[in-house]
Image (spheres, rainbow, N blue to C red):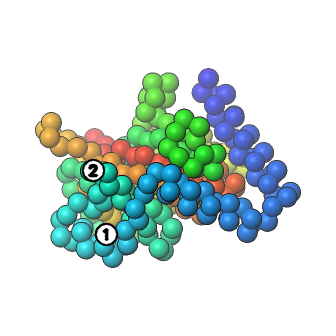
Amino acid sequence: MKKLLFAIIAFAAVFSFAACSDNETYADLRNRELDSIAAFLKNENITVISEDEFTKRFKEGKTLTEHTNGKNEYVLFNSNGVYMQVLEQGCGDFIKSGETADVLVRFDEYNINTRAKICKDSWTLSNKVAAYSYYIDKMTVTNTTGTFQATFDTKTSLMATAHASQNYGVSGVVPSGWLVPFTWIKVGRPQTDAERVAHVRLLIPHSYGTTTAAGSVNAYFYDLLIQRGR
């Protein structure tokens, strides 16, 4: 079943890109992606806050994005086009400048070009389901004076395996959109029942996503649970 899933994902990505490239320009594909992003924001009733407002809340120790009482806020980072919602800022501490940490991630992935909504139709990959629960995507994350870099452990990463390049095979490269949260979240391990791991949601344009996203010029949505490895 695992091999079949990976084969389907790889074939679909290659076929989609090949079919589109015969009939559509990059501008056409990019416009379609922007339309999908706009539709997703509308369908999910998302309110977008500015990066300045988000940064102000962070400095003041306030809730970074409101997500209760009917509110559904995301911040837009203008430099990369990534939208982020912080559901839980996490326990423990931030990854400090000069520090390298092992980070474990549970995730759901959605292709919003398939359907611009969080639903079964757009759901493409997950290590939260029983069939793939033995995959805990492990990343080695380094903070170099505020700039984060990371690599997947290719032996344990569902993301790396599923989005393997046809030409280069399985790569440990982490999509740059996945690195955006680390400036803002704490990465620890819960020590009490009251503590929670970091929980973020990301809407990532193709240029900051996986090789599959880049090849098809599609935005993807991710729901991530993030904690420190042992």
Q: Residues within 10 Å of mark 1 (few under 14, many from 20)?
A: many
Which residue is rendered at x = 75% and y = 48% of the image? 16
Q: Position of residue 152 (x, y in %)?
A: 48, 48
Which residue is rendered at x = 33% and y = 64% of the image? 183
Task: Using the image as rendered, state which of residue 171 and residue 179 is in the foreground.
Answer: 179
User: Is the C terminus in the top left, top right, bottom left or bottom right quadrant?
Assistant: top left
**Which residue type does callout 1 highlight?**
Phe
Q: Which mark is residue 171?
A: none
Residue 27, visible in the rendered structure: yes
Q: Secondary structure at mark 2?
A: loop
**Which residue type does callout 2 highlight?**
Thr
Asked whether, in this view, residue 111 is left or right of residue 20, the answer is left
Task: Using the image as rendered, state which of residue 121 and residue 132 is in the foreground.
Answer: 121
Res 94 → quadrant = bottom left
Task: Using the image as rendered, state which of residue 31 and residue 186 is in the foreground.
Answer: 31
Which residue is rendered at x = 82% and y = 50% of the image? 19
User: Is the N terminus in the top left, top right, bottom left or bottom right quadrant?
Assistant: top right
Between the residue at mark 2 and the residue at mark 1, the CA separation in whole angstroms equals 17 Å
Residue 171, visible in the rendered structure: no
Q: Which mark is residue 68?
A: 2
Q: Which residue is mark 1?
A: 54
**Label 2 or label 1, whichever comes before in sequence order:** 1
